[in-house]
Each structure stands twice: as structure tokens, then as C-alpha cells.
Image: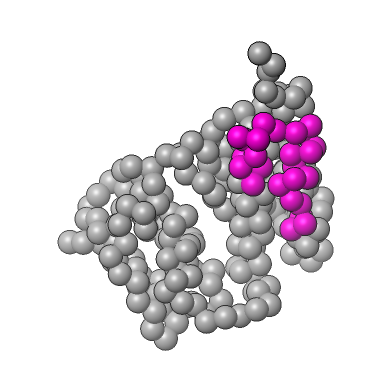
């Protein structure tokens, strides 16, 4: 049987570049879910004047393809401007690795999604959003799908922990069906704040847990 991975994939899998967290990052994002088998977090250090990515790191949970693609996109993005980094495609990442098995192509999509989400996080937190649409319940719900329920490893929406979303005069209130005393409540609170607070027209976020 032919081995499915190229030597370049194996090299980035065994010796991943830019792996870990960035203590001085000014943008970050996480895509995927460990319950689905693959997850990647991307951290950026962007120069506020030049808008170039001066440093980038990633953390990966998943297979060889997931780790290798997370590694290659950090190499492709480092030194580029945000606009240049946005143009990095999953196809480009795959080609840089000499190709991936068809069944693993989604890994390169996930890595690029992580990069683009981190760029989006930077732009939102630095007032760079050009198209300012009013925040909707649908947009809040979309972002909450990226917050994991640690109890089962799936997102808050899919596991129906989100019981209500209310938007009023710049304030977003999210009701979570979990006791405030639960060991994971603090982490969930922090992640919800991280995902919702950057929205341009949101000036307050309240996370309500059950008593």
C-alpha cells in the first residue's frame, strides 16, 4: 500500500514550525472542534503601523495533515500584510505540502479558516471593519458556534446550552443553560466575551448562567 503523505507533509508533522502560543499576540482565533477530530488555534502579532504579521504561532489538535497545514500556513503568512495573508488559500497550502489525500483536504481548509478568523479578530478589535452591518442574533449565534462546550467537546449552539440571545442598544445578553458554579462556567464566559466583544456596535456583553 502506498503511504498517503508526502515527505513535506511528514516533515511539517514531525517538525512543526511556529508551534505554541504567542504571549504578546494582538489577535487570535480557534477553528474546528476536538469532538470532530481536528482543531487549530492561530495567534498573530501584527505591526499596528505597517499591518504586517511580524510573528505567528499555532496550536493544533488532530491528525498529521492538521498539524502540517497549521505549520505551513504560519510560514506562508509570516511577514505578509493582512491583505496579502487573506489571499492564502487552502489549495495553496496543500500545494506547498506537495498535496494531501482527498479525504484530508478539509485540514487545509481548517488551517486557512483559522488564519482568516485571526485576521478578522485583529481588524474588529482595531476598528478596521469597512462594512459595518448592525449586529444580529444570527451573527451572535454564528460566533457562539465557535465556543466549545467542554462537557462534550461540541459547540454551545449544537449542544443547546444557549437558551437566549438578546440585543438592545449596544448590549448583547447571552443566556447559558449551565450553573454559574460549574467548573467550566468561567472558561465559557471568557470565550463568549472574546467572540462577541469585538463586534463594532457592541459596547457591553453579559453572559447569564442559571442560578
Residue at image coords 46%, 40%:
36
- Position of residue 179 relative to residue 206, above or below, is above
Task: Depth check: give the residue in front, 4 or 51.
Answer: 4
Q: x and y percent of residue 121 in the render?
A: 60, 62
Residue 163 appears left or right of 80: left
- Position of residue 103 relative to residue 195, above or below, is above
Q: Can you name the residue that lies furthest to the left here?
A: 211
Instruction: Tell me, yes or no, whether the highlighted magenta stretch contains residue 106.
Output: yes
Q: x and y percent of residue 168 in the render?
A: 38, 83
Residue at image coords 81%, 63%:
50
- Position of residue 22 relative to residue 204, above or below, is above
Q: Is residue 190 visible?
A: yes
Residue 193 appears left or right of 185: right
Q: Main secondary structure of the magenta part?
A: helix
Residue at image coords 36%, 49%:
149
Image quarter of residue 172: bottom left
Q: Quadrant of the C terminus?
A: bottom left
Task: Depth check: give the residue in front, 205 or 69.
Answer: 69
Image quarter of residue 204: bottom left
Instruction: Tell me, yes or no, whether the highlighted magenta stretch contains residue 80.
Output: no
Q: Can you name the residue that lies furthest to the bottom here?
A: 169
Residue at image coords 79%, 32%:
98
Residue 56 appears left or right of 169: right
Q: x and y percent of residue 159 in the render?
A: 32, 52
Q: Quadrant of the N terminus?
A: top right
User: Which residues make up the magenta segment?
Assistant: 85-109
Q: Can you name the residue that lies furthest to the front here?
A: 1
Q: How many marks?
A: 0
Q: x and y percent of residue 199 in the render?
A: 53, 72
Q: Is residue 54 visible?
A: no
Task: Depth check: give the residue in front, 60 or 90.
Answer: 90
Amino acid at each position: 500500500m502506498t503511504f498517503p503523505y508526502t515527505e513535506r507533509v511528514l516533515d511539517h508533522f514531525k517538525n512543526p514550525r511556529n508551534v505554541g502560543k504567542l504571549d504578546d499576540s494582538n489577535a487570535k482565533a480557534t477553528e474546528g472542534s476536538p469532538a470532530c477530530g481536528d482543531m487549530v488555534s492561530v495567534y498573530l502579532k501584527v505591526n499596528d503601523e505597517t499591518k504586517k504579521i511580524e510573528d505567528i504561532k499555532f496550536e493544533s489538535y488532530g491528525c498529521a495533515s492538521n498539524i502540517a497545514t497549521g505549520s505551513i500556513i504560519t510560514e506562508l503568512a509570516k511577514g505578509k500584510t493582512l491583505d496579502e495573508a487573506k489571499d492564502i488559500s487552502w489549495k495553496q497550502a496543500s500545494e506547498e505540502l506537495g498535496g494531501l489525500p482527498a479525504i484530508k483536504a478539509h485540514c487545509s481548509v481548517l488551517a486557512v479558516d483559522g488564519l482568516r478568523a485571526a485576521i478578522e479578530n485583529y481588524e474588529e478589535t482595531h476598528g478596521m471593519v469597512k462594512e459595518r452591518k448592525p449586529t444580529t442574533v444570527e451573527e451572535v449565534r454564528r460566533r457562539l458556534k465557535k465556543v466549545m462546550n467542554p462537557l462534550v467537546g461540541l459547540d454551545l449552539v449544537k449542544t443547546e446550552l444557549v437558551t437566549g440571545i438578546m440585543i438592545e442598544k449596544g448590549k448583547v445578553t447571552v443566556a447559558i443553560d449551565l450553573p454559574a458554579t460549574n467548573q467550566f462556567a468561567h472558561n465559557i464566559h471568557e470565550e463568549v466575551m472574546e467572540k462577541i466583544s469585538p463586534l463594532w456596535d457592541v459596547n457591553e456583553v453579559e453572559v447569564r448562567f442559571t442560578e
